[in-house]
Image: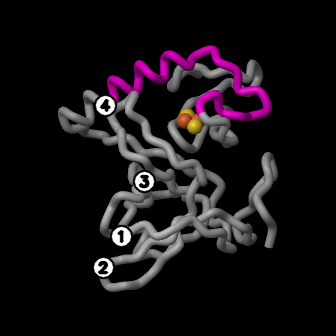
């Protein structure tokens, strides 16, 4: 078992100390959901509720994978301490196996009107970061470690994407 330190390569099949949101379902069971331990809100793109992002690189019970719509390590769901079901209890370190090296947000393929509005706000917010430095592989938003993905550096929280040669944020779909 290893702690996850900055810039350490994680390997599927090995176990690591990870921050987890401990949640309780309506039938009284408790589950550990691996998260990025940074409680925040995103009012700039229409999400004013404090939340944690799920770190889908690490194992969670299949019931919770279903609950949080996890697919290939990615999800649009977050952990909101204000939610009643599952109810957030606390953050706790647990030892979990790595199941894959990628995680991040999913965006709706057929967004509703309000999702479209929020996506538009998101794109504007994103554009305000283009050109910003990601020195040390740190995201210029909250300093999260960015992950290597398809020849880019991608932040697992809100998907700011950088060119690893210039270490600066680029447009999301640029090549
Ligand atoms: S922490 Fe928000 S994009 Fe990196």
> With respect to residue 119, does 106 lie above or below?
below
Image quarter in which the C terminus is found: top right
Distance from label 1 to label 4 (Cα)?
25 Å
Marks 3 and 4, the one that precedes in the sequence = 3
Marks 1 and 4, the one that precedes in the sequence = 1
Label 3 environment density (alpha carbons within 10 Å; few <14, some 14–19, many ≥20): some
Marks 2 and 4, the one that precedes in the sequence = 2
Left-right relation of 170 to 71: right
Task: Determine the secondary structure under disc 3.
Answer: strand
| Contact (Cβ within 8 Å) of mark 1 with mark 3 | no
Q: Nearer the viewer, residue 57 or 83?
A: 83
Ligand 1: quadrant of the figure: top right
Number of the label disc, if any, that sits on residue 86: 1
Instruction: Return the x and y of residue 51 as percentages of the image width and height.
Output: 45, 50
Q: Name the residue beneath numbered marker 4.
A: 118
Q: Name the residue beneath numbered marker 3.
A: 78
Q: Nearer the viewer, residue 21 or 6?
A: 21
Task: Determine the secondary structure under disc 4.
Answer: helix
Q: Residue at x 44, y 60 (%)?
A: 70
| Contact (Cβ within 8 Å) of mark 2 with mark 1 | yes
> With respect to residue 5, does 111 lie above or below?
above
Is the C-beta of the residue carrying label 1 under 8 Å from the nearest atom of ligand 1?
A: no
| Contact (Cβ within 8 Å) of mark 1 with mark 4 | no
Image quarter in which the N terminus is found: bottom right
Distance from label 1 to label 3 (Cα)?
11 Å
Marks 2 and 3, the one that precedes in the sequence = 2
Specify start and end residues of the magenta stretch as a single range: 119-141
Q: Name the residue beneath numbered marker 2.
A: 26
| Contact (Cβ within 8 Å) of mark 2 with mark 4 | no
Distance from label 2 to label 1 (Cα)?
7 Å
């Amino acid at each position: 078992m290893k702690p996850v330190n900055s810039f350490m390569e994680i390997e599927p099949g090995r176990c690591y100390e990870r921050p987890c949101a401990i949640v309780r379902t309506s039938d009284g069971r408790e589950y550990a959901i691996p998260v990025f331990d940074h409680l925040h809100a995103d009012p700039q793109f229409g999400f004013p509720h404090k939340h944690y992002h799920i770190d889908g690189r690490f194992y969670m019970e299949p019931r919770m994978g279903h609950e949080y719509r996890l697919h290939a390590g990615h999800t649009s769901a977050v952990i909101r301490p204000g939610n009643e079901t599952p109810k957030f209890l606390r953050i706790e370190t647990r030892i979990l196996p790595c199941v894959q090296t990628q995680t991040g947000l999913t965006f709706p393929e057929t967004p509703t009107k309000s999702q479209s509005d929020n996506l538009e706000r998101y794109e504007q917010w994103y554009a305000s970061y283009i050109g910003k430095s990601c020195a040390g592989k740190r995201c210029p938003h909250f300093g999260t470690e960015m992950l290597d993905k398809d020849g880019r550096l991608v932040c697992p929280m809100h998907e700011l994407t950088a060119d690893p040669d210039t270490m600066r944020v680029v447009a999301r779909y640029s090549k």
